[in-house]
Image (tube, rainbow, N blue to C red):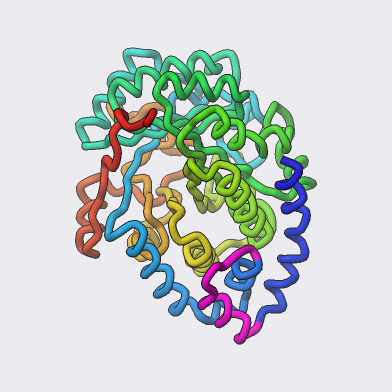
Amino acid sequence: MNDLLAVLESVESLTRLQSEADERSVEAALHCTHPDLRELAILLSPAAGQHLEKMAQRAQALTQKHFGRTISLYVPLYLSNYCSGGCSYCGFASDREVPRSRLERPEMIEEMQALKAQGFEDVLLLTGECCPEADFEYLLDATALAAEHFHNVSVEAFAMTQREYGRLGDAGCTGITLYQETYDTRLYEKLHRWGEKKDFRYRLEAPTRALEAGLRWAGIGALLGLSNPVSDLIALFAHAQYLMKRFWRSGVLISFPRICEQRGDYIPEFAVDEQLLAQAIFAFRICLPDVPLVLSTREGQRFRDGIAGVGISRMSIASRTTVGGYAHSAADPKDGQFLITDTRDVETFCAALQAKRLEPVFKNWDRVFQNL
């Protein structure tokens, strides 16, 4: 982990490099055979922003080469919105006045059956930070239950010990998603007002512990808008590289969530518009051609339709960020962790993909291969 911390400390110099990039350096980065952190920084530069079409063409060609014309689909299932954390930017923070609930086992089964009826085979289970109402044992039981219904079960929850990740794997979990939120340590301290998540290093090391425990993959990301987005993106790339080199038999996924409207009305300090988001996705695809890049329903219909297959290879659809919401949709969307922007149902979204000659994939592996 010391190697990773050393790399993250070099982010500042790379951020300066991107601000000095020019036409010649952008062209060199676009055609580099083995692009690295330096090339990524250049491709995130204002100079590269003038070449988005070239970047998009290269990103699309690499996406099709490594993933074909397919988009892997998953769906999030919120098990609980109880939370012990004090994240300033989150609608589930423990000081928010939001109705709290959790799914009990019969309700979980109803939700899972509703998702199965829509064709889903890849489900992401979510909770808030660990608390008595939704602790590790609760999540472990939910994971085992989900593994009886779906071929691919992953978890997005609190940071855990290596032993706990191992137990999740034994219960049928294939991978985790855990955003560092921001790699700016000083801002991280300010944004996370209380709770276990306040420990920057413990959270940073969680994907390492998960892969050491034998999970197949770890998904990472930064919540764009919390801090300088270019610095966070460079640090995110460095984090991904570290995991890929250390756990070359495992998989790494990268997500690009932008902070959006939520209960608590946190106002982002940094603007991340769609152009910068697209540029970031193209840059990551050019520099990491075979890594799955993920985009959620935080983003709107027009952007998601345009970016599918042009860098992005994995997407969530028909999402709810309230507890449950699939078998019974009475919950107010404003009570979710954040507001969904792309609200299309499965059939409508898949039709949009097919109109672009992209194939929606609900299942691309079988659990029988998990231990091979």
Residue 111: quarter of image? top left
Residue range in magenta is 22-37
Q: Quadrant of the N terminus?
A: top right
Which residue sits furthest bottom?
A: 24
Q: Quadrant of the C terminus?
A: top left
Residue 27 covered by magenta stretch: yes
* Residue 187 in view of the camera: no
- Residue nearer the viewer, 162 or 293: 162
Please name the residue shown 50% across and 50% down the image.
255
- Residue nearer the viewer, 154 or 252: 252
Q: Give the image location of residue 10, x and y in percent.
A: 76, 58
Residue 171 vertical position relative to residue 92 in the rendered view, above or below:
above
Residue 57 vertical position relative to residue 322 in the rendered view, above or below:
below
Please name the residue shown 25% across and 51% down the image.
360
Residue 333: quarter of image? top left
* Residue 213 in view of the camera: yes
Q: Give the image location of residue 69, x and y in percent.
A: 27, 60
Q: Is residue 21 left or right of residue 366?
A: right
Please name the residue shown 60% across and 55% down the image.
237
Q: How many marks?
A: 0
Please name the residue shown 63% across and 43% down the image.
180
Q: Give the image location of residue 193, x and y in percent.
A: 74, 34
